[in-house]
Amino acid sequence: MSIFRTIKEDFCNIKRNDPALHSVFEIFFNYPGLWALFFHRVAHSLYKRGLRFIPRLISGLSRFVTTVDIHPAAQIGERLFIDHAAGVVIGETAIIGNDVVIYQQVTLGGVSTSSGKRHPTVGNSVVIGAGAKVLGNITIGDNAKIGANSVVVKDVPCCATAVGVPARIINCNDTKNEELRHDMIPDITKEVLNYLFKRIAVLEETIKTGDIKLMEKEDHELTEIYSSFIKSMR
């Protein structure tokens, strides 16, 4: 697809992804993510031709106008939707597939200063929630979802949902179009702490009563609960 058709698709993609859009005129004035993507398409096209200064200049001007920082070498597929856009950072060696949705304050960054591939590869139809940090040369599989404010430092399988700091896999299925419901995401830290508190309570009660059999019974029940919770995250 030519750069002109790709840019046209970017503009049409706003209508498909944002129910807040009420008129075509809003596209030109209220979507900094779209304009950041437009500037990147131009800068990336020049960058592939061996130019360096002009693409970086375009990238710098785009960052000043839109608050979105995309390195001109980053490879971005078709129909990327950057919602709200403020504070989004996409590194030099990042690769993004088609039909990806990225919310504000997302970083696709590196964890190394060495040359080579050091930024994430994001598959097709991925959703990355607001404030998420995806760091390093890792792969986010097709149709995966990253929860808001998660810090992802390991690969995420296709169709999986990852949340937390560091991010953990809480769901992995073949459902491609299921929405990312942040109100239904389990509190991983809370569940682990509850398990530890209950385990400590069992040990304290055993020390007081000396009932080893009761401890073994309750400890076995806690272990089963914890094991079930861990399996539910895979």
Image (cartoon, rainbow, N blue to C red):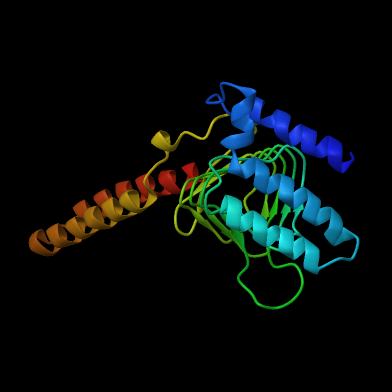
Q: Is residue 82 visible?
A: yes
Task: In this rendered view, identify the residue nearer to me: 152 or 61.
Answer: 61
Q: Nearer the viewer, residue 43 or 163?
A: 43
Q: Is residue 106 above or below residue 172?
A: below
Taking the spot 66% from the left edge, 62% from the top edge, the residue there is: 60
Q: Is residue 45 above or below residue 180?
A: below
Residue 79: x, y in percent? Answer: 73, 37
Say if residue 96 shows up in the picture. no
Residue occupying image coordinates x 75% and y 76%: 115
Q: Is residue 19 left or right of residue 94?
A: left
Looking at the image, which residue is at 91% across and 60% down? 49
Give the mark count.
0
Determine whether 212 is above or below 221 in the image.
Answer: below
- In this image, 94 relative to 153: left or right? right
Farthest-out residue, bottom: 114
Residue 221: percent from the left, percent from the top?
A: 31, 46
Assign the N terminus to one quadrant of the image: top right
* Residue at 45% across, 53% down: 164
Can you give x and y, in whole percent of width and height, for residue 234 in the image? Answer: 54, 46
